[in-house]
Image (spheres, coloured by chain):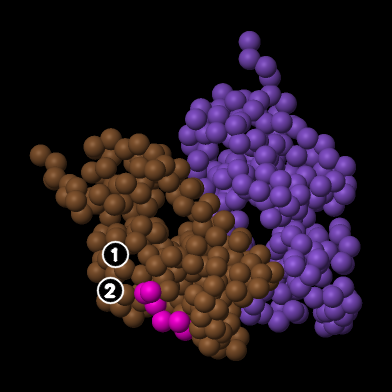
Chain colours: A brown, B purple
Amino acid sequence: MAKLIDKTMYANIINNVSKCIQLTEEEQHLFTSILKVQHVPAKTKLLQEGEVCQFEGYIQKGCIRIYYVNENGFEVTVTFAVEDWWVSDIASFHEQKASRLFIETLEDTEMYILSPETKERLLQKVPKFERVFRMLVQRNLVTFQNRLINTISQKAADRYLEFIKIYPTIPQRVAQYYIASYLGVSAEFVSTIRKRLSAK
Amino acid sequence: MAKLIDKTMYANIINNVSKCIQLTEEEQHLFTSILKVQHVPAKTKLLQEGEVCQFEGYIQKGCIRIYYVNENGFEVTVTFAVEDWWVSDIASFHEQKASRLFIETLEDTEMYILSPETKERLLQKVPKFERVFRMLVQRNLVTFQNRLINTISQKAADRYLEFIKIYPTIPQRVAQYYIASYLGVSAEFVSTIRKRLSAK
């Protein structure tokens, strides 16, 4: 008899995937049986620059930051990820090349993990997952594209407004320092922007 | 009797796609019959900021530039695309939202075009194309990610070296001005870098 799926445990990720494709009971079972559950304490580095990223993970609970260190030694936050987001360095994961990024947990985090091997196995067995990952990487691309354009062309206050639209819960969850490193301004300046906006 | 495919005409695009998936004769026929051939003269805008991108195109011949205009009115080149590249504003194309980008031909260009409707039809009829477009968008993401990191952290001369690795034919094909707008430096500075490099 097939092992029963813990439906409560996987309800969120099944729901996430079901926005793109319809899964039979059997496919759901196959999918969740391939996932590896990982509990990671806050302030843990899941990936460091120079390493090859071996995971693509769905965040069941928690908060993660992706950043790189620029030539002056400053951390630049590329993206935050919270519940119901997927996180990976797709470039490194798929080309099995050294990453230029760091990925770290900001809170205690629970993730469901695919490795390059288990992802490929999933795609072999249930090819319609190609669509899920195409959609994911598309959304990722949109974020990066906007990020590139905004970084160069928007004023810091507008970038902050854009930021809280994408990440409504982040300002309550992480240190101002991290938001500053995303916006490319000082922590003091983030504080000034927030005061100015709340006064409006 | 099914219409014969002009194999010479579509050899490159079939070859491009066959790096990701294997197509039967029938699937090749279906694919190429869905494509729309488009001849575009040099210096034509295929997309303007504010418009919704209605095409994803494979470049059979020619050279295309994607750029945006920043708040100071300067053009910033995001990417170039030449033979065997695909080009689109995937963000705008898939979410049917106004684009922030301009796409223009720099040379007379021949493209094979998918619209949102024909792409979806192709994916419905030959679902394994999901894999092709996932790979494409992944490569795109890698480019954007590197672009974002390099823009902030690399020196202009290193960016130029990176640039000619990605685009070996571009310096011979387009005005220095465009390369400058990609690197975020003045045209004079590109000229200086090139002289310095050729003197080595």
Using the image, determine if residue B99 lies above or below residue B115.
below
Most frequent secondary structure within the magenta stretch: helix
Q: Position of residue A128 (x, y in %)?
A: 40, 39
Indicate whether residue B28 is drawn in magenta: no
Q: Residue at x 38, y 74 (%)?
A: A172
Q: Position of residue A41 (x, y in %)?
A: 27, 76
Left or right: residue B18 versus residue A126 is right
Q: Chain of mark 2?
A: A
Pointer 1 or 2: first along the chain: 1
Residue type at mark 1 is Lys
Using the image, determine if residue A182 lies above or below residue B106.
below
Choose between B56 and B46: the one closer to the eye: B46
Q: In this rendering, does residue B189 appear at all?
A: yes
Query: Is disc 1 in contact with disc 2, using a CB cutoff of under 8 Å?
Result: yes
Q: Which mark is residue B1?
A: none
Which segment did they paint magenta? A172-177
Choose between B24 and B127: the one closer to the eye: B127
In this rendering, do the residues under marks 1 and 2 share a single chain? yes
Q: Residue at x 53, y 51 (%)?
A: A138
Using the image, determine if residue A140 lies above or below residue B94.
below
Q: Position of residue B172 (x, y in %)?
A: 87, 61
Left or right: residue B16 versus residue B49 is left
Q: Which residue is mark 1?
A: A61
Q: Residue at x 65, y 73 (%)?
A: A155
Corner quadrant of residue A84 = bottom left
